Image: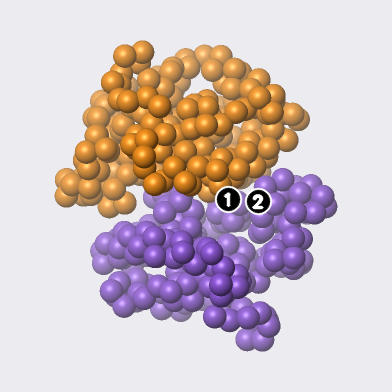
Chain colours: A orange, B purple
Amino acid sequence: MELYDYLDSGNGYKVRLLLAQLGVPYRLHLVDIMAGATRTPEFLAINPNGRIPVLVLDDGTALAESNAILCYLAEGTALWPADRIGRARVLQWLFFEQYSHEPYVATPRFILRHLPADSPRRAELPARLAQGRAAFAVMERQLAQTAFLAGNSYSIADIALYGYSHVAHEGGHDLSAFPAVGTWLARVAGQPGHVRMLPADALSMPRN
Amino acid sequence: MELYDYLDSGNGYKVRLLLAQLGVPYRLHLVDIMAGATRTPEFLAINPNGRIPVLVLDDGTALAESNAILCYLAEGTALWPADRIGRARVLQWLFFEQYSHEPYVATPRFILRHLPADSPRRAELPARLAQGRAAFAVMERQLAQTAFLAGNSYSIADIALYGYSHVAHEGGHDLSAFPAVGTWLARVAGQPGHVRMLPADALSMPRN
C-alpha cells in the first residue's frame, strides 16, 4: 500500500497509527500541502477533493477520507466491533470527529502553526475554541463512564479522536477541565504498537 | 424505533428517506431545534452532542450522527455494499458529506431560512458558497463517470448527499454549472419508495 500524507496532519497520523498497530507495511509519499501539492492534476487524479491522506491499495484503488480509510483497514480486526450496534457506536464517534471536533481542534492548530502571525484567520479562534470545548465536554461525559469512546475496548474511534486531541494545546486548547479526556489520552498512548505523530526532528516549520 | 428529528433538517431527512425506502416503521418525535429543545437535560441524555437526528432502537439504545444511523440501518440491504472496497467508497462519500459539503451547503441554507435577515452570520455566505461549489465540483467529476456516487448502484452515499444537495438553491447555490449533479438529483428522486423532505404544508417558518 502507498500512503500520501503530510506528517503534521492529525488526519494522516490516524492512518499511520493504525497501520503501525496492525503491522501493515506501506510506502509513505510526503505531500507538501502548504506548497499546493494537493492541488496538482496528478494529486487530484487520486483524490478529486484535493486532501491528504489518501491510501492507494495494491490494485491501484485510491481511498480518501481518513476515517473511511480507518474503517477499511480495521475490518476484521479487534479495532472494529463484530456487532452491529458496536459498529454504529464507532461510526457515531467518527462522524462526530469530522463534524464537531476537527474544525474546532485541528483548524485552530493549523491557524497557529501554519499561517503567519498576522493572519486575519486568527479572528476565528475564539469561536472555534468555544466549539472545541463543547466537543471535549461530550467526550468527557463518555470517558467518565467507559475506558474508551465506543465502550470498554480500544477501537478506531479512539484513534480518530486521539489524532488531533493529543495536540489540541498547540491550537490553544486547555484540557485541564476535562480530566477523563486526559486519562484517556494517556491510555491510548499506552496501547501496544503506539507510535508518535512526528519523528522528533521531522519538521522544521515555524512553531507558534 | 423512535426518531427524534426536525423536519427542515436535511440530516434528519436522510434518515427518514432511508427508513421509508426500507419500509421500516418508526415513531417520529419532532424536536424544535430553534427553541432550544436539543439543549434540555432530557435531550442531552439521549445525545450529549445536542443534535438531531437521534434514532432510539427498541432496546433503548440511542444512536446519533445521521450518517452513522444510515450505516446501521442499511447493513444487510442493497444500499450498503457487500464488498469491502465498496463499503469504503460509500464511507468516503459519507465523510466527504459531513466535512466538505454540509457546512457549505446546509449552513448557508440555515442562515437564510432560520436566522433574521440582518444576522451578522450572512457575512459568512460568500466563503461558504465558494467551498460548496468546490464540493459540487467533486461530485460532478464522479457523477460524470458513474450513475451514483459510489458506483453504478444506488446506496446510502446518494441518500446522504441528496439530503442537502436537493435544497442547495435555498442556501443560495446555483447548480446549473453541475449538469451531472442535476441529472443525479432526478435519478435519486426517481428511486422506488422515495419520499420528499417536507410535507407540503409542514412548516410555517419564515422563508427567505
Q: Which mark is residue B64?
A: 2
Which chain does the residue under circle 2 lie in? Answer: B
Q: Residue furthest bottom?
A: B201
| Quadrant housing the N terminus of chain A | top left
Q: Which residue is mark 1?
A: B68
**Side (left or right) of A111 relative to A49:** right
> Is residue A156 or residue B172 the one in the foreground?
B172
Q: Secondary structure at mark 2?
A: strand
Can you give x and y, in whole percent of width and height, for residue A82 in the image?
59, 36
> Is residue A38 or residue B25 the one in the foreground?
A38
Q: Residues within 10 Å of mark 1 (few under 14, many from 20)?
A: many
| Quadrant housing the C terminus of chain A | top left
Mark yes or no: residue A35 visible.
yes
> Is residue B3 or residue A107 the one in the foreground?
A107
Do the residues bearing badges 2 and 1 touch, measured as CB atoms within 8 Å? yes
Q: Amino acid at mark 2?
A: Ala
Can you give x and y, in whole percent of width and height, for residue A111 in the image?
41, 38
> Is residue B21 or residue B125 the one in the foreground?
B125
| Vertical side of B169 occupied by B143: above or below | above
Can you give x and y, in whole percent of width and height, for residue A146 in the image?
72, 28
Q: Which mark is residue B172?
A: none
**Circle count:** 2
Residue drawn at the location 67% of the way across and 58% of the way down: B52
Q: Quadrant of residue A175?
A: top right
